[in-house]
Image (cartoon, rainbow, N blue to C red):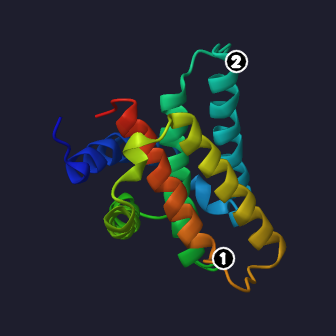
Amino acid sequence: MATNTSQEFDAVIAVCKSLFLKKTKDYGTAWRILRPASITDQIFIKAQRIRTLEEKKVSKVGEDITSEYIGIINYCVIAMMQLDLGEHDPLEMELKAVEAVYDTKVNETKELMFNKNHDYGEAWRDMRISSLTDLILMKILRVKQIEDNSGQTLASEGVSANYQDMLNYAVFALIKLGVQ
């Protein structure tokens, strides 16, 4: 089967972006009030729920892991936007401005994905979805540690790069799950 990672990536992001923009129309940019650590915790909650569902195989609230991966992607974009926006920037943003920044963050992340895919030969295609979940959880723990160290790292990539990796892992999981 021939694959087109770029088209698959774009199809997944289209689903995520559509939901993000609908929620932005409903709620505005209420997420602007969240501090980075709170966003990290939201991603953790979603990833932990995925892991629990993978292990227990039963959902008692009716939502499957697909919606949780979509949430991870959108929270990763929110986190990257928040890292660029200051506390003195307005809480409420125009929809078009939010959409433009969303696209910028996704495009930067897609470019990183292609660079890594080149070096790793799209190894993610042979991975289990549960491994992608575990990698997201590991990245969350790394981000928490960096946040607890006031953003200081000695030899590690920064917080934004970890959000990009989590976003890409979630996209890979959704591609494997057949989301388009």
Q: CA distance from mark 1 to mark 2?
A: 40 Å
Going by the numbered disc 2, the residue's amino acid type is Lys
The quadrant in which residue 51 appears is: top right
**Front-most of 52 and 22?**
52
Q: Residue at x 62, y 32 (%)?
A: 50
Q: What label does residue 56 carry, if any?
A: 2
**Which numbered disc, 1 or 2, marks the residue that appears first in the sequence?**
2
User: Which quarter of the rendered picture does the C terminus lie within?
Assistant: top left
**Front-most of 24 and 10?**
10
| Left or right: residue 26 compared with residue 99 | right
Q: Secondary structure at mark 2?
A: helix
Residue 169 is situated, as x and y percent measured from the top left of the image, at 48, 50
Residue bearing mark 1:
87
User: Which quarter of the rendered picture does the N terminus lie within?
Assistant: top left
How many other residues sit within 10 Å of disc 2, few (<14), some (14-19) or many (≥20)? few
Q: What label does residue 3 carry, if any?
A: none
Kindly tell me whether residue 124 is visible in this rendering.
yes
Q: Examine the rendered structure and indicate whether residue 72 appears above or below residue 119.
A: above
Q: Secondary structure at mark 1?
A: loop
Kindly tell me whether residue 25 is visible in this rendering.
no
**Front-most of 108 and 89?**
108
Residue farthest to the right?
A: 148
Residue 48 is situated, as x and y percent measured from the top left of the image, at 70, 38
How many other residues sit within 10 Å of disc 1, few (<14), some (14-19) or many (≥20)? few
Residue 124 is situated, as x and y percent measured from the top left of the image, at 42, 48
Q: Residue at x 26, y 43 (%)?
A: 11
Q: Examine the rendered structure and indicate whether residue 146 appears above or below residue 48.
A: below
Q: Residue at x 70, y 18 (%)?
A: 56
Going by the numbered disc 1, the residue's amino acid type is Glu
| Left or right: residue 122 compared with residue 24 | left
Residues at badges 1 and 2 in contact (C-beta under 8 Å)?
no
